[in-house]
């Protein structure tokens, strides 16, 4: 019997105290930005935690309507729009 791999809780952070709304969209939520809004803490850091199965996921932040890569992620891949998606490995 194969051992089931445990899911992991992954925290995503985006620092921009001046942002009005921050969302995350990626291969883990069908690229739907409305599914996962981030919450801003007292220091102006936007955060959310997502429980993911082991694998490789691409994602981007949507900051006040603008799609952007995660500036704190060193892993990225070219996307079909000529930009980059950030990558997280679980």
Image (cartoon, rainbow, N blue to C red):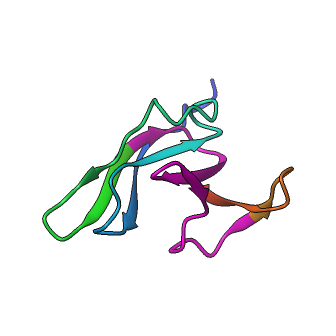
Q: In the image, residue 19 lies at what x, y percent?
A: 35, 61
What quarter of the picture does the N terminus occupy? Answer: top right
Magenta residue check for 67: yes
At 52% from the left edge and 54% from the top edge, which residue is drawn?
61
53 vs 39, left or right, is right
Residue 54 seen from this side: yes
Could you tell me which residue is drawn at 61 percent across and 63 percent down? 69
Number of labels in the image equals: 0
Above or below residue 4? Residue 89 is below
Magenta stretch bounds: 50-76
Residue sitting at x 61%, y 50%: 59
Q: Position of residue 22 (x, y in %)?
A: 40, 51
Q: Which quarter of the picture shows residue 8?
A: top left
Tell me: 72 left or right of 17: right
User: Where residue 87 sits: x, y (%)?
Assistant: 65, 59
Q: Can residue 7 be seen in this view?
A: no
């Amino acid at each position: 019997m194969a051992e089931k791999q445990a899911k992991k809780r992954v925290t995503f952070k985006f620092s921009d105290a001046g942002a009005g709304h921050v969302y995350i969209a990626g291969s883990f939520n069908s690229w739907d930005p409305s599914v996962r809004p981030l919450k801003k803490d007292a220091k102006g850091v936007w955060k959310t935690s997502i429980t993911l199965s082991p694998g490789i996921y691409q994602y981007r932040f949507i900051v006040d309507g603008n799609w952007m890569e995660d500036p704190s992620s060193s892993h990225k891949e070219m996307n079909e729009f000529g930009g980059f998606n950030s990558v997280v490995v679980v």
